[in-house]
């Protein structure tokens, strides 16, 4: 399946099939494995998301990273609809945003793209065992990864157990995750 239209149609069918899957699945438990992993990358900024709907609950992990003095970045959408990673300095900076997302409320956008490297925890509708990610189909993360091509990234997909599949269709613009983590453990362990 190399034709872009075939890939898009296959992804759309998978998205429809995933509605409601894993919403009651364990959304916690991954932190016990993620915390030591993050500790293996001292000084690296950490980008992640505040989980909503089917996504793992990341709030306590965000708080723990801030308390440990780590640089934390969360996704925001700029006025043009592009995903950016904004620096979060304190939990009380969070606010609700479009699409039910939660993002930093500060107007200043310290974009992660200025950093030489970063750990990036990525949400997704599903991940396969080889690190392929199925997003919502808007391409926000794919375009951000394209803009971050000069950075050294270690990308980890976070999802519930029910959203891990054997294989997903992918195209040339899809960035494979270096690791995939669920509440049950590492599905794909990043190489250091």
Image: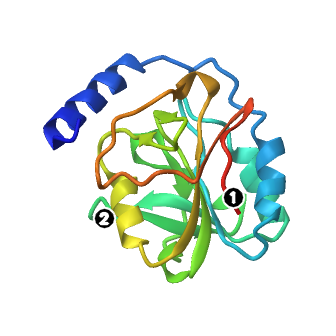
Q: Residue 59 bears which disc, if any?
A: none
Return the x and y of residue 161 as percentages of the image width and height.
63, 25
Circle 2 Cα neighbour tier, 10 Å, few/some/many (<14 / 14–19 / ≥20) = few
- Residue identified by numbered label 2: 79
Q: How is the image coloured?
A: rainbow
Determine whether 84 is above or below 127 in the image: below
Upstream in sequence: badge 1 or badge 2: 2
State the CA–CA distance, disc 1 to disc 2. Answer: 22 Å
Q: Is residue 174 left or right of residue 150?
A: left
Return the x and y of residue 2 as percentages of the image width and height.
21, 41
Determine whether 113 is above or below 162 in the image: below
Return the x and y of residue 20 as percentages of the image width and height.
47, 17
- Residue identified by numbered label 1: 92
Determine whether 154 is above or below 58 in the image: below
Circle 1 Cα neighbour tier, 10 Å, few/some/many (<14 / 14–19 / ≥20) = few
Residue sitting at x 81%, y 71% = 69
Residue sitting at x 50%, y 36% = 127
Q: Is residue 61 left or right of residue 76?
A: right
Secondary element type, mark 1 = helix
Q: Quadrant of the N terminus?
A: top left
Residue sitting at x 40%, y 55% = 141
The answer to whether one can see residue 102 in this image is yes
| Residue 14 in which image quadrant | top left
Secondary element type, mark 2 = loop
Q: Quadrant of the C terminus?
A: bottom right
| Residue 58 in which image quadrant | top right
**In this view of the protein, which residue sits in the foreground, 30 or 53?**
30
Asked whether disc 1 touches disc 2, contact meaning CB atoms under 8 Å apart, the reply is no
Residue sitting at x 60%, y 55% = 48
The answer to whether one can see residue 83 in this image is no
């Amino acid at each position: 399946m190399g034709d872009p239209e075939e890939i898009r149609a296959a992804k759309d069918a998978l998205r429809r099939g995933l509605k409601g899957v894993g919403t009651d699945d364990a959304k916690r438990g991954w932190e016990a494995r993620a915390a030591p992993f993050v500790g293996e990358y001292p000084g690296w900024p950490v980008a992640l998301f505040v989980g909503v709907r089917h996504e793992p609950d990341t709030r306590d992990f965000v708080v723990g990273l801030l308390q440990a003095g780590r640089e934390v970045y969360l996704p925001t959408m700029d006025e043009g609809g592009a995903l950016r990673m904004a620096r979060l300095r304190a939990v009380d900076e969070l606010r609700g945003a479009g699409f039910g997302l939660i993002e930093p409320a500060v107007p200043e956008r310290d974009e992660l793209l200025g950093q030489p490297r970063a750990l990036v925890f990525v949400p997704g509708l599903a991940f396969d065992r080889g690190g392929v990610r199925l997003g919502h189909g808007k391409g926000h993360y794919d375009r951000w990864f394209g803009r971050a091509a000069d950075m050294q990234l270690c990308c980890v997909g976070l999802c519930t157990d029910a959203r891990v599949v054997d294989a997903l269709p992918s195209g040339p613009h899809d960035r494979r995750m270096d690791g995939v983590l669920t509440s049950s453990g590492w599905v794909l362990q990043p190489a250091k």
